[in-house]
Image: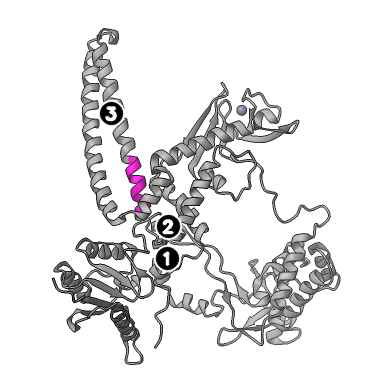
Amino acid sequence: MSTRKIAAIYSRVSTAAQSGPNKSSLDSQLAECLAEARRQGYEVPEHLQFQDVMSGRRDDRPDFLRLMAAGRRREFDCLFIWSVDRIGRTLRAAVNAVGDLKDVGITTYTVKEGDLNDTIRLGVLIAIAAREIERMGERTIPPKERQRAAGVFVNGQAPFGYRKRADKSLEKCPGEADVVRRIFRSCTTGGMGRTQIARSLNQDRVPPPEVKVVLPDGTTRRMRPALIEADGGVGAFTAWLEKNGARVDGIPEWQSRTVARVLDNSAACGWLWAAERKDKDGNPVPKRETVKLVIHGGPIVTESEFNDAAKAKETRREPGRRPGRRPVTPWLLVSKIVCGSCGKNYFHTDSKGVHYYVCHARKTGKLCKGPYLQMVKVDNEVKAAVKGFIENRIGGPAKIRELVMGQSLRDRRQLTQNIEEKEAELARAEMVWKEKQAILGRLDEMEVERASIPDLVADNDRARAERQRAASALSALMDQKSLLDTGVIVSGAELDKIVNRIEAGMRSMTATEAGEGQDSDVVFVVKALVDQVVVNPDRTLSIRLVDDPAAVARVFAEMLRSAVGDVRQVQAIGGRVPIPEM
Ligand SMILES: [Zn+2]
């Protein structure tokens, strides 16, 4: 056997621009991989240095296909890539490629993330297809988005206090900026509340940000007087009104909520917080990062002034108003628990220091016999059900660990195969049961008493149970698969953290009292997995849990995300880690 260790290198950029003559990152990938391969004692023959200039989302990359072919012929022992997103831009593609090479005994090593067969658990827990889709969205950034990311205020009118320059950068709008500054000062150093500030602005006859203008034909439009005066000089707004025969509708005044809106708008200190959006299918797109606006001459207030105002607003209780933040609801099954007698939601109540769930109708004196139930008992029963659900469907922490740590790629194939088998088994069981039912049906038609055919009835029951078993076994496998499919790549240590957390959460599932922090894992898991709890008139509970593998996987994805925060490798997979310039 030869002692020479042979390696291959695969590098890829997605556009010709990235591979241009000026310090191509293609060359830099190759150089780094070569250096690493040699450091580890590998030889890299020239014909095993593969390069593509193509999107990683395409399967027909010519050198990639040659690489995989050479791999299957076992022409090398180890593949070096700069980072895992080079080999495939989707997680699935990367997982498959690495898995195929692993199957023939080839290790894949990435300069950025290390040994893929060792530190990275392919397959894994979670962060789901959603994550993948989310990333897809990020990759095709329309020009407007790019501009926006660069701090250009692309969407509509300039925020209050600013006006747009010809190059679309912002600058302070004289009259408005003064008002913004005054509002912030009144709030921070002046210690005034929103209502007080609004009153003082009205006393000084400061026009509000927008006024409603009625045109002669009866149509209305909103205008910013100070903005018009800033552009056209003092009196420009009145002149415009006269020229167009328009009038201001009513007496424009500041309201406390207008003041609040000014205090809440981070544009005042130069930051744009992107609003929540929905994509074309109506799914929420997560908030993007905040964007630093390009503001000619600087923002109106400093960041610390903005933060001080936010703090002041938070701490001040205005007379007759409740504080801005809603109190945390101290009970677990908020909006999940309903009355089996009248269908109304159950609410929280307490008596002599003991917490109860009570039918809302009954609580408000209407006629309902929905029982009072002690909160701790109900919560614990629900938690136990959730715990059982996790253990049965996913297989509990041990199974999660196994799925993640184990030979996930092999698991995936095995799992796919098992699922196919179970599907066939379910189909068979379904058929058998239908046959038995048909027999019973015919006998029913012939008015044969069921009591006289106990064997056939028992047969039918057995067939139904068999079908039920097959169906739940299939669901369990589907759950596991959706865990694998959601593939996030985490290191062993990070994974341990998550699994420990899930374990701890499950241990406390039956032990905790009602009213645990609303941010706790237990509460999170219960809320995510419980669909509805119905309180039956006989004081028993009917607990309905979600029956959707994706939802189960999502729960763990969420936990993973909050447990690891910024998993470096996840970002690498998303392709957001920049290729170093040489
Ligand atoms: Zn009721």
Ligand number 1: quarter of image: top right
Q: Please tell me the numbered disc located at residue 570.
A: 1
Q: Which circle, 3 or 1, is nearer the viewer?
A: 1
Observer able to see residue 324: yes
In the rendered image, residue 581, in percent from the top left (x then y), is placed at 40, 86
Q: Secondary structure at mark 3?
A: helix
Determine whether label 3 and label 1 are within 8 Å by CB: no
At label 2, which amino acid type do we have?
Answer: Ala
Residue drawn at the location 36% of the way across and 50% of the way down: 402
Left/right placement of residue 200 relative to residue 293 reads right
Nearest to N terminus: mark 2 or mark 3: 2
Residue on which disc 3 sits: 466
In this picture, which residue range is highlighted in magenta? 475-484
- The answer to whether the residues at label 1 and label 2 have Cβ atoms under 8 Å apart is yes
Q: Position of residue 14 (x, y in %)?
A: 32, 78
Mark 3 Cα shell of 10 Å, populated few (<14), some (14-19), many (≥20):
some
Residue density around tag 1, few if under 14, some if 14–19, many if 20 or more, within 10 Å:
some
Question: Magenta residues: mostly which secondary structure?
Answer: helix
Give me the disc on residue 49: none
In depth, the one of 482 and 183 nearer the eye is: 482
Distance of label 1 from label 2 (alpha carbons)? 9 Å
